[in-house]
Image (cartoon, rainbow, N blue to C red):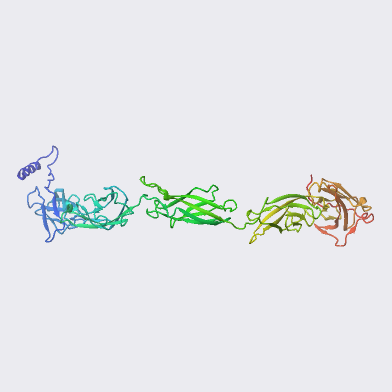
């Protein structure tokens, strides 16, 4: 009891520990927890409880501190400094703050702490002042057609800000409207407590292809107070889509399709139409076509038109009327997605396509193409070169063929228009600029007598063998040397020949046959293609023509006289002053005056 507690407190005040001065212990306050209902109306303040002090009345004052008193939100609660009565000063909102923890203490009039501080807990009692709220106004779900009764479609969940430990936040769900209401107004059911929407309609009736629509709207109500009549409500809409499963196989609209195509052409020849009752733009509707039989050469191909699901039959390899004028194809159609187990592909999932090939006048074809022959150059004009062979693919028409020259760059050939025999009209020259890598190429044309006529082209390649028909020559043709040079070596010269080995090198280079040349000049062999020119005595400053005889290795061989212009020049300070006068021809008298002492540096490869 309170009197007993006061006696104990008084007794404790006189106790002191050995060796210490008497002291006064802090007494405890009696601070019961307090409650206050939210949303109270004036007048304020309202007393909500009392704090009891163990001190005698009038010897102390009460103080209240903490959030809600002297800290934000300030001034919600106050305490009577004399009686300890605690009051609330205005209306509270539990959803903002559901409880407050403050501290109560007493002090003497000098401000010294007498009791406490002790915790005061004030709890805000909930009222049903918040409606259930769906986080979205519209929810979407889907269910596969043919699903059994009781299949969960989706979950609807609302939120209530009231105290979840009370009926104020105990929600119950209900469907108040279904649109459309066919074939039944109660196709779906919502669990009142969990908010799960499940199917009520039978699996047989839940058929996407027979329902009036594939989309249903449900208006859902959530009510608090456990669904009682006084509960507050919130609404939302659930949109449920009946999704498709592949329970219908695609079927051709006709058992037989016909197509016509000209031989030699490619592209689409016929569109194969199909029906499928499943959902368009899904794998259960999209068609895949395949050729079962009738295409051993893989001349046909089928692609699906993504816009209308039709099969486009292509010719990918040109057809030949003379080989086969009629093709029978067996086509199958399937879906991208597999059918459900209880459904299979029937006879209507296959169709026959008759493709008739139309004849056109095709141009003659050369064989072989190119035709390659080997000939010796310089054969006599009118010589036989080749016999062209062109055939007409239109063997059933019995047409004739005539030949003509289409391109003959050098003008060396002609062809018999009926027999296709090619002869020469000029000498074949391997060294001509029309010949590349020893090959001469001509193009011929063959034309039939169809209506209209058709043409074909063929190529003739002539490999030309070399004949020794080009005389060799000496390079370089000009040499310069200083008149005061002290070297008897004048220049190194080499042979050139347009013919191929063995009609070219090795070359024999020697002095011309004029009298007296060997008294002034000497030519010595360096290798198979080059020789050294040397002076035997000096020459004056002038220009001199030195005749050289060069002979190739052909059988029979060919020779040529090449005159090399030797300029004997005056050399001063790295400058050569040469005569512009006409050259002197070599003779016994003219080559006996001056010694040519320079050497012309000409870099030539040696074997």
Residue 596 is left or right of residue 24, and the answer is right
| Residue 432 spot, x, y in % from top left | 77, 55
Residue 337 is left or right of residue 90, and the answer is right
| Residue 532 spot, x, y in % from top left | 84, 48
Residue 488 is left or right of residue 421, and the answer is right
| In this view, 397 is above or below 8 | below
Given residues 423 and 552, the one toward you in this image is 423
Query: Residue 448 falls in which quadrant of the image?
Result: bottom right
For the N terminus, the quadrant is top left
Given residues 124 and 361, the one toward you in this image is 361
Whether residue 272 is visible to the viewer of this picture, yes or no, is: yes
Given residues 303 and 139, the one toward you in this image is 303
Residue 269 is left or right of residue 606, and the answer is left
Whether residue 66 is visible to the viewer of this picture, yes or no, is: no
Query: Residue 584 falls in which quadrant of the image?
Result: bottom right
| Residue 222 spot, x, y in % from top left | 22, 55
Query: Residue 180 falls in which quadrant of the image?
Result: bottom left
Q: Determine the residue located farthest toward the left in the rendered image.
A: 3
The tally of labels here is 0
Q: Determine the residue located farthest toward the top in the rendered image.
A: 18
For the C terminus, the quadrant is top right
| Residue 77 spot, x, y in % from top left | 15, 56
């Amino acid at each position: 009891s309170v009197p007993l507690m006061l006696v104990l407190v008084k007794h404790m005040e006189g106790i002191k520990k050995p060796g210490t001065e008497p002291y006064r212990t802090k007494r405890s306050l009696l601070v019961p927890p307090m409650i206050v209902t939210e949303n109270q109306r004036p007048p304020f303040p309202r007393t909500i409880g009392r704090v009891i002090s163990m001190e005698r009345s009038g010897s102390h004052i009460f103080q209240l501190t903490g959030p809600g008193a002297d800290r934000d939100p300030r001034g919600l609660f106050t305490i009577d400094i004399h009686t300890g009565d605690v009051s609330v000063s205005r209306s509270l909102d539990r959803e903002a703050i559901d409880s407050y923890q403050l501290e109560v203490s007493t002090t003497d009039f000098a401000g010294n702490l007498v009791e406490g501080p002790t915790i005061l807990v004030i709890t805000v009692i909930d009222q049903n002042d918040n409606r259930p709220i769906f986080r979205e106004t519209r929810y979407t779900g889907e269910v596969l057609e043919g699903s059994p009764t009781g299949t969960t479609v989706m979950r609807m969940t609302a939120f209530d800000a009231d105290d979840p430990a009370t009926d104020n936040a105990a929600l119950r769900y209900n469907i108040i409207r279904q649109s459309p209401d066919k074939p039944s107004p109660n196709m779906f059911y919502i669990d009142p407590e969990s908010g799960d929407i499940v199917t009520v309609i039978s699996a047989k009736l839940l058929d996407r292809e027979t329902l009036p629509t594939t989309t249903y709207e449900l208006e859902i109500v959530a009510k608090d107070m456990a669904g009682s009549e006084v509960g507050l409500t919130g609404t939302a809409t659930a949109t449920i889509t009946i999704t498709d499963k592949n329970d219908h196989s695609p079927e051709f609209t006709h058992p037989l399709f016909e197509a016509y195509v000209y031989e030699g052409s490619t592209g689409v020849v016929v569109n194969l139409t199909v029906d499928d009752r499943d959902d368009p733009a899904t794998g259960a509707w999209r068609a895949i076509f395949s050729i079962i039989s009738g295409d051993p050469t893989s001349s046909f191909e089928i692609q699906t038109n993504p816009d209308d699901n039709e099969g486009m039959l292509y010719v990918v390899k040109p057809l030949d009327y003379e080989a086969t004028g009629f093709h029978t194809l067996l086509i199958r159609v399937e879906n991208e997605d597999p059918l459900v187990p209880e459904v299979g592909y029937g006879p209507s999932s296959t169709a026959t396509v008759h493709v008739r090939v139309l004849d056109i006048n095709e141009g003659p074809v050369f064989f072989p193409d190119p035709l390659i022959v080997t000939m010796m150059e310089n054969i006599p004009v009118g010589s036989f070169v080749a016999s062209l062979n062109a055939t007409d693919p239109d063997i059933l028409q019995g047409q004739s063929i005539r030949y003509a020259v289409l391109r003959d760059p050098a003008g060396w050939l002609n062809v018999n228009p009926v027999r296709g025999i090619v002869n020469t009209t000029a000498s074949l020259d391997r060294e001509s600029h029309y010949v590349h890598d020893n090959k001469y190429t001509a193009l011929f044309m063959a034309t039939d007598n169809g209506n209209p006529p058709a043409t074909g082209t063929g190529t003739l390649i002539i490999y030309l063998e070399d004949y020794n028909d080009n005389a060799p020559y000496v390079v370089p043709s000009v040499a310069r040397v200083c008149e005061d040079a002290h070297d008897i070596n004048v220049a190194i010269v080499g042979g050139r020949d347009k013919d191929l080995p063995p009609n070219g090198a090795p070359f024999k280079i020697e002095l011309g046959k004029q009298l007296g040349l060997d008294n002034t000049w000497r030519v010595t062999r360096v290798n198979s293609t080059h020789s050294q020119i040397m002076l035997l005595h000096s020459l004056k400053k002038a220009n001199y023509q030195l005749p050289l005889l060069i002979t190739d290795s052909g059988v029979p061989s060919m020779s040529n006289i090449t005159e090399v212009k030797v300029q004997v020049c005056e050399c001063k300070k790295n400058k050569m002053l040469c005569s512009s006068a006409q050259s002197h021809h070599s003779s016994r008298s003219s080559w006996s005056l001056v010694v040519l002492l320079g050497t012309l540096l000409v870099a030539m490869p040696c074997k």
